[in-house]
Amino acid sequence: MTNETIQDIKVYMQTLGQQARQASRQLATASTAQKNAALEQIAVTLQEKMAWLIAENAKDLAQGEANGLDAAMLDRLSLTEQGVAAMAEGLRQIATLKDPIGQISEMSYMPSGIEVGKMRVPLGVVGIIYESRPNVTIDAAALCLKSGNAALLRGGSEAAHSNRALAACIQIALKQSGLMQQAVQVVETTDRAAVGEMITMPDYVDVIIPRGGKGLIERISQSARVPVIKHLDGICHVYIDSEADAEKAVKVAFNAKTHRYGVCNAMETLLIAESRAAEILPGLVELYQQKGVALRGCAQTRAIVAMDEATDADWATEYLAPILSIKVVADVQEAMAHIAQYSSGHTESIITENITTARQFLAQVDSSSVMVNASTRFADGFEYGLGAEIGISTDKFHARGPVGLEGLTSQKYIVFGNGHIRE
């Protein structure tokens, strides 16, 4: 890459950033009615431009096939009439969600006589870097708009035609709604140098949200000069306690692994109390085997049911595949110690009928979602009543767990007085 090319990209990205910052100031004061009208207009425009969107997507699919993308990647890349309709419906659903911006809370009078509280405000400019799925362009734009944030979107090169077409629809709708078209901008260059610029522009970008594989997120986290909301792995655990209901345990553990494999909230390690292992494991293992799940167990597990040996590396692996590690533990203390050592801080669940043990697990397990008698697959913004999510965070500052509208906001203190001065 020539110095001239690097400089061109730098200027291009800073221009986008400046425009996004300006648009963010308008959006911060936009009314709920304005934002909802824009979301509805985007939905209408997507439906009006459906044939064109599908034709542009076909260019990406053809290029993907030529580049040897596998069937799963091509499926994620594909836009169909049903897919476009689903995006339009998603926009309308987000429009129905409660607007967090401007909400005032915790108002109280101080001894001095001033009244102090908090007001919820947008973050400003949200940069989102993602791979493959064109629907993320619409989901991210919608959540940012509703929460009063400008969005700077950089999709994968494999979806370049699709993302540009979707961006054009968004900007048509924004203009018709009276909002600045720069409120949502898609980075049009596929040069990776654009990502490097985007994550090092704290003057113009307030937060980065990467959505993609572990490698992408690691690279961005290591190089960013802008705060990053992220999770790297989803090494999720289910622990079947000595006082678990056997029927619930089998039902939850089976669902947590087999409902979907390639998702971050799927169980990757099953822990089971040794007092229940001989009773529960044989039937549960049979169910997994019927689904084609490859099993890897500790020595105690393999003494009960034949399977491959689990290594230390297995406990630290996010499979995203029909593979499961199983470990027999003495009790909840050993289960929590194992989770503390190997968990990625995403989601853990305990199956027990003992409320004291359940509360101990909830208090001591340090993950973004901790559950009792429920599948880890519920760790999702929609399931949590957020309406939608822009990602999941395993960080401990600002947002943690599924990040919805409120996660794209902050709070500032507000003070009411009546000529009060500090004595």
Image (cartoon, helix red, strand yellow):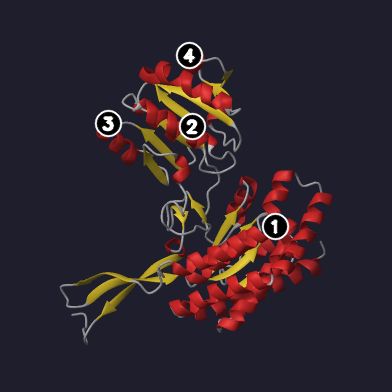
Q: Secondary structure at mark 3?
A: loop
Decide: is 344 above or below 155.
above
Pointer 3 or 2: first along the chain = 2
Disc marking residue 156: 1
Closer to us: mark 1 or mark 3? 3
Report which residue position mark 2 lands on: 254
Amino acid carrying label 4: it is Ile
Pointer 4 or 3: first along the chain = 4
Report which residue position mark 3 lands on: 354
Pointer 4 or 1: first along the chain = 1
Residue 71 lies in quadrant? top right
Quadrant in which the N terminus is drawn: bottom right
Instruction: Calculate the distance from the C-alpha at mark 2 to the C-alpha at mark 1.
Output: 34 Å
Q: Secondary structure at mark 4?
A: helix
Decide: is 344 above or below 311.
below
Pointer 2 or 4: first along the chain = 2
Q: Residue at x 75, y 70 (%)?
A: 7
Residue 417 at what x, y percent from top left? Answer: 23, 82
Instruction: Calculate the distance from the C-alpha at mark 4 to the C-alpha at mark 3.
Output: 25 Å
Label 4: how many residues lie within 10 Å, few (<14), some (14-19) or many (20+)? Answer: some
In this orientation, does residue 188 appear?
no
Disc marking residue 304: 4
Instruction: Calculate the distance from the C-alpha at mark 1 to the C-alpha at mark 3.
Output: 47 Å
Residue 245 at what x, y percent from top left? Answer: 34, 28
Q: How many marks?
A: 4
